[in-house]
Amino acid sequence: MKNVKKQHLPQKPCRHCGRPFTWRKKWERVWDEVKYCSDRCRLAKSRSPATSPT
């Protein structure tokens, strides 16, 4: 992932909120396992069902 512009980084939708989030260096080794865009969404997954994005 060296010398890749931000606009060309991989993205995927968050399983809880549906917003797209971009690859981060700290997720380099576990990118396939990352499912949520933030700790807030990760913790909220068990509290309530996923909301539908508008």
Image (spheres, grey):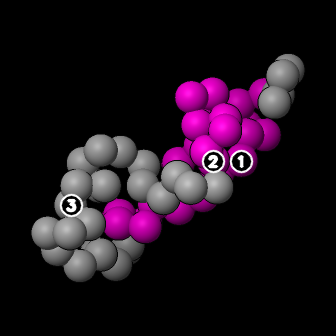
Q: Where is residue 10 in the image (x, y as percent from the top left)?
A: 71, 47
Q: Nearer the viewer, residue 30 or 11?
A: 30
**Quarter of the picture holding the C terminus:** bottom left
Q: What residue type is labelled 3?
A: Ala
Q: Which residue lies furthest to the right in this view?
A: 3
- The residue located at (73%, 40%) in the rendering is 9
Question: Label 2, on which residue?
Answer: 31
Work out whether 38 lies above or below 53: above
Q: Residue at x 81, y 30 (%)?
A: 1
Of labels 3 and 1, earlier in sequence is: 1
Q: Is mark 1 on a helix, strand or loop?
A: loop
What residue is shown with label 1? 10
The residues bearing labels 3 and 2 have C-alpha atoms spaced at a distance of 20 Å
Residue 32 visible in this rendered orientation of the protein: yes
Dot 2, crowdedness within 10 Å: few (<14), some or many (≥20)?
some
Q: Which amino acid does label 1 sit on?
A: Pro
Label 3 CA crowd tier, 10 Å (few <14, some 14–19, many 20+)? some
Residue 22 among those drawn in magenta: yes
The residue lying toward the viewer, choosing from 51 and 35, is 35
Number of dots carrying numbers: 3
Depth check: give the residue in front, 54 or 12.
12
Numbered range of the magenta stretch: 5-31
Q: Distance between the residues labelled 1 and 2?
A: 10 Å
User: Which amino acid, mark 2?
Assistant: Trp
Place residue 16 in its image quadrant. bottom left
Numbered disc 2: secondary structure:
loop
Dot label at residue 44? 3
Q: Residue furthest left?
A: 47
Q: What residue sits 52% from the left and 52% below the top?
A: 34
Residue 31 location in percent, x, y?
63, 47
Q: Is residue 6 left or right of residue 30?
A: right
